[in-house]
Image (cartoon, rainbow, N blue to C red):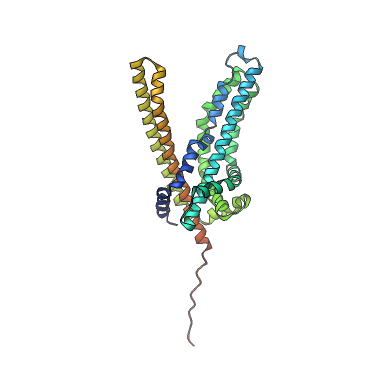
Amino acid sequence: MDSWYIIRRAAWITGHYRLLWPFGFLVVLIGGAVAYPQVFLLVLRWSLPIDGAAASPSLPQHSSTLAAVLALLAWLGVAAIASYLSEGAMVRMVGEIERSGSTSIEQGVRAGWGCLRAVVRIALLSGLPVGIVLAQCSAPAALSLLWPSPEASALTEIICSLWPMVALVTLPLAAAMNLPYEFILRRCLLEGRPAGAAIREGPRMVRRNLRRAAPLWVTLLGAGLAAGLLLTLLNLLGLFAIIRMASTLWAASHSLAAAALAALPCFLLLVVAFSFLHGLYLVFYSAAWTVAYHAVAESEEAPARLPRLVLLRA
């Protein structure tokens, strides 16, 4: 399995099949909310009382807190569905491109919706170690919801501040789980295997082809880090330019509202551009692993070469 050929092939698919772009854009713009559980904790902290006088239970207070929590949970649910649907659609569409050379958005939507349950099961089961770590770090936040008090609010703030440390633990764990997850997902979606069977067969497939798959995994990991650093730098530069423009307008007009309204279109444009570039990378990443899976599957299905028979004359 030639890693550079796979990368070139994935880049060609990403550039020529623009029907894949909306799914990558959707993952970043909507489904990316699943990757930020600290937003839930921050909003939960803001909805809690911060002084002893306001800490007494009251029905409106509990109602507003419950409404905020339910709204956030609903948004996270919609974002998760959009993310998993788009991920399954990209895998199926690239698989169809590799088989027949053509695909369509309708096929992608139908394929993504049809394999949604399988993708969710695989994501839940294969991401269980990371989920356990996140759950252990997030569970104390439930105290803030059950017993609103200044102490609970302070506890929520501490939990929010510890998320960078949690990331140091979960990121290596998630990186180690990434390679089996990609093969498990494609074993299920491209071969039609049940989720449980794919979870058993995917890691075995990785072990048999680890020497061929590991260089691609390292290459894509490095490319992801480089792309993330580049996009983050561009995003920070854009934010700095927008803040500089808003501060200049504020100093000239002495109106914070006018400066914010003037900077809002630029901020939205920056968000859309950042999401678009990130979505393109996700399309490329998904296509690379789908092409790699096809190469590995074809090599395993190819019949072994028969030994040459040498006929000796009597």
Question: x and y percent of residue 111 in the render?
Answer: 55, 49
Most extreme residue toward the bottom, as rendered? 314
Res. 275 image quadrant: top left
Residue at the farthest front position: 106
- Rendered location of residue 231, percent (x, y): 40, 37
- Residue 284: where, in percent of width, then height? 44, 47
Which of the two residues, 157 or 33, is positioned nearer the viewer here? Answer: 33
Q: Is residue 143 left or right of residue 216?
A: right
Relative to 26, is 188 above or below?
below
Residue at 47% x, 51% y is 214
Q: Nearer the viewer, residue 108 or 290?
A: 108
Expressed as whole percent of the image width and height from the top left, the position of residue 264 reads: 41, 26
Q: Count every numbered label the image shows and give the total.
A: 0
Q: Is residue 45 above or below residue 209?
A: above
Can residue 292 be seen here?
A: no
The answer to whether 3 appears left or right of 301 in the picture is: left
Q: 312 or 231: nearer the eye?
A: 231
Task: Give the quadrant of residue 256.
Answer: top left
Q: Is residue 106 visible in the rendered structure shown here?
A: yes
The residue sitting at 64% across, 18% down in the picture is 60
Q: Quadrant of the N terminus?
A: bottom left
Q: Residue at x 43, y 43 (%)?
A: 281
Tell me what residue is drawn at x 50 percent, y 50 percent: 93
